[in-house]
Amino acid sequence: MVSKIMPVAELTPLETQSQILDPQIWSIDEKNTRPNCIFCKQELTIYIFKNIRINKNSYNLSECGKCKIGMLHPFPSEEELAKLYSCGNYRTDAGKRFGFAIEFLIYLGRLRKRRRINQFIKTGKILDIGCGRGLFLDVMRRGGWDTLGTEFNEETASYAIKTYGLKIFPGDIARHKLPTGDIDVININQVLEHLKNPNKVIQESYRLLKKGGMLIISVPNLRSPQFAIGKKKWFLLDLPFHLFHFTEEGLCKLLSKNEFKVKYIKRFSLEISPFGWLQTLLNISGIRFNLLYDLLKSPELKDSAMEPIQVKGIIAIFLLLPIYFPLALVLSVLEPLIWKRGGSIEIYAEKK
């Protein structure tokens, strides 16, 4: 029931969310110290977080009161981004991030997504922007789809090319001058928040899609109860990887501005929602930040510079799991059913 695509719900304005959002976090800063919103060019008016220290760098997160989209500032440099997404850091040279059991669940999730997409368009040509190791495109190709993908650079694209023989374009899709109106579906799964130019990517997607084609965007939701409870310790905040922090209202407005018609919003993800809650609950309990997530990673991704894992942290996880795991499942179901929100949202938008 909770995994089905849900219709768009009436959105609550920012001013009426005092029961969900902490007013001390969502406060107006009178000083003109923030950059302008890249979408509307107006000043970012709402400070969410100030001076978050990550890897010896300091970051701020502010929201545009008009666009309802948050923005990290300053952005990491190009050199920092290249290091963040390099093989051996963000994913292994074999393209994977987790052990066998988790990777199998991810594979099943890709099969489910193919079935959902086939509800809109039976088969055609699909472009996956930020395709990672290429697993999703391989699943789609086995289902009869023609496939294209993009990746951060040639290094991160290499696994998908060598393993699956996929056609992958490195870097910004716009620079490759693909034919207009040639794509049936464009998928941007947990990627738009990583990009420096999300509006341009949506505009290019509109150009590439056929009339009636579908743009599918999945992003973390800054208005979710997960964020309201987790705040800086929300698992899906993921700084500094996430440069933009979307709300459901903000992303819908952005799509409408670019002449897309939002058809459906899916507010539950079996792959993302329960674990997002589980890791957030563990984080706010005082256990080392994202410890369970780190323990589930492939051994190759264990950072040698990472804070040493204390045995008491692992013991605390095992003691709390019998409580937090069922609680995370319940909260994942309540998010879309009661609050009409989700820690992660997946929007299906049609080219008019």
Image (cartoon, grey):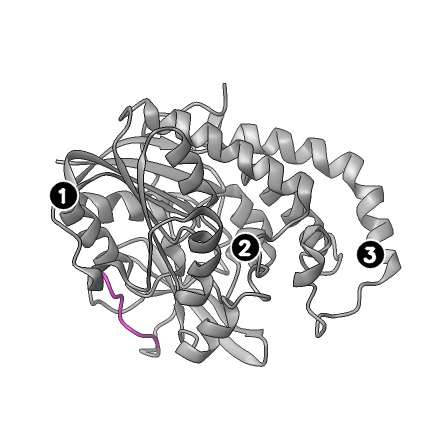
Task: Name the residue located 45 percent from the left edge and 66 percent from the top edge.
Answer: 155
Q: Would you identify the image quadrant in which residue 231 lies?
A: bottom right
Query: CB of mark 3 within 8 Å of CB of mark 1?
Result: no
Q: How crowded is mark 1: few (under 14 residues within 10 Å), some or many (20 or more)?
A: some
Q: Would you identify the image quadrant in which residue 200 lies?
A: bottom left
Looking at the rendered structure, the kind of residue marked 3 is Gly
Q: In which quarter of the image is the C terminus?
A: top left
Task: Give x and y (percent) for residue 54.
Answer: 57, 73
Disc 2 designates what residue? 95
Disc 1 designates what residue? 259
Q: Earlier in the sequence, mark 1 or mark 2?
A: 2
Disc 3 designates what residue? 313
Total number of numbered labels? Answer: 3
Answer whether residue 66 is visible to the viewer in this image.
no
Task: Name the residue located 39 percent from the left edge and 28 percent from the top edge.
Answer: 143
Question: Does the segment drawn in magenta span residue 35?
Answer: yes
